[in-house]
Image (cartoon, rainbow, N blue to C red):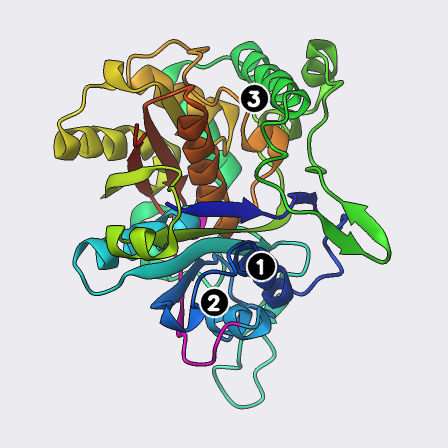
Amino acid sequence: MVDATRTPFARHAGALASIRCDDLAALPLQTLVQRHPQIDWSALDDVVLGCANQAGEDNRNVARIAALLAGLPVSVPGMTVNRLCASGLESVAIAARAIRAGEAHAILAGGVESMSRAPYVLSKALTSFAREQTLEDSTLGWRFVNPAIRERWGVDSMAQTAQNLATRFGIERSTQDAYALRSQQRAEHARQAGIFAEQIQPVTVADRVFNEDEHPRPHTTAEQLARLRPLLGPETSITAGNASGINDGAAALLLASPTMLERWGVTPLARIVASAAVGVEPRYMGIGPVPAIEALLARTGWMLDSIDHIEINEAFAAQVVACTRGLRLADDDRRVNPYGGAIALGHPLGASGARLLMQSAFALRRGSASRAVVSLCVGAGQGVAMALEALS
């Protein structure tokens, strides 16, 4: 991993809502190109971007369109990847495998999501003069559901899958809110320490410059979280305060082989060691990071105790706590999401995995960790994980 950057993550209908998804995806690509004028970008082998929705302005292979909008040579191809919430991580895994196999030497990878601009989508009529077409919101979750999937596996909402884990693992509302508060506090400490500034590229919208994430609520208190109404009814515990946001953002990373590193004369951030993907029961999709990390550890030969930095995407506080307990870690283990997570920073689906990777890579470069693991749960029941290590 040579370099990485991202836009600020914005709130739904917030600072980045006026930017088309393909234009948003082009921004971090442009930044990386401008940072490295010594690179012959016509030698780039591919652009691989994750995107979960792909129902609106991101519908026409957004990676290829973004590459063209970013001014990359027309000879550079592009591919869009969809592993839902882990799309940004999967794009990097695909790029790393291609380079490791010797089929590529340099790839731009990452992800994008504009949840503000995700459209409503209308089904086609199944018969002549039919009047029962379905209008679906493509922002988040299931749509145009296959009846066989509904019958066999269920189509629980994302919040319901988190509640399922809270019930299974006995994770009380107070525990979830305490985790959410830590996420906000850790994110604010990281912001003040400049942790996010090294990742974020400023974005100008209507003569206004946005250079910080818009979603965090640093003044959140335990009392405020406790007053929020549960999303699924009075006997449940998932709230807007202990869940991730609906957000907009884009991220990109430059990956290269040792041959290209020598040719460019650059010092990389970190080395990608391996990745792993697993399937889990859809109703408990949030537990996916546990078997994914276990598969990754088996593949690398690492022990969990030897890892200094662990990122588990914060889809929900209940989901992360279920994962830490599944991995036999403390709820507040300092190695897990040390700079906060998606509860504070937001979760633009296709970009989140790339954000977690660059955050881990910068931590490795600073010397605050030597080994890192990044993992995300995935809708419809999956988990993906990746291992990074420092180069010195």
Position above or below: 311 against 20: above
Q: Disc 1 designates what residue?
A: 34
Q: Which kind of residue does numbered mark 1 sit on?
A: Gln
**Is 376 placed left or right of 294 in the picture?**
right
Instruction: Give the Cα distance between marks 3 and 2.
Output: 38 Å
Which segment is the magenta one?
Answer: 72-85
* Residue 127 locus on image (x, y percent): 49, 86
Q: Disc 3 designates what residue?
A: 237
Label 3 or label 2, whichever lies nearer to me, is 2
- Residue ID at (51%, 72%): 72
* Residue 87 locus on image (x, y percent): 41, 52
Visible in this render: residue 164?
no
Q: Disc 2 designates what residue?
A: 63
Q: Are marks 3 and 2 in contact (CB under 8 Å)?
A: no
Could you say which quadrant of the image residue 210 lies in? top right
- Residue ID at (24%, 31%): 291
Residue 68 included in the magenta stretch of the image:
no
Q: Nearer the viewer, residue 265 or 184?
A: 265
Q: Which mark is residue 201?
A: none
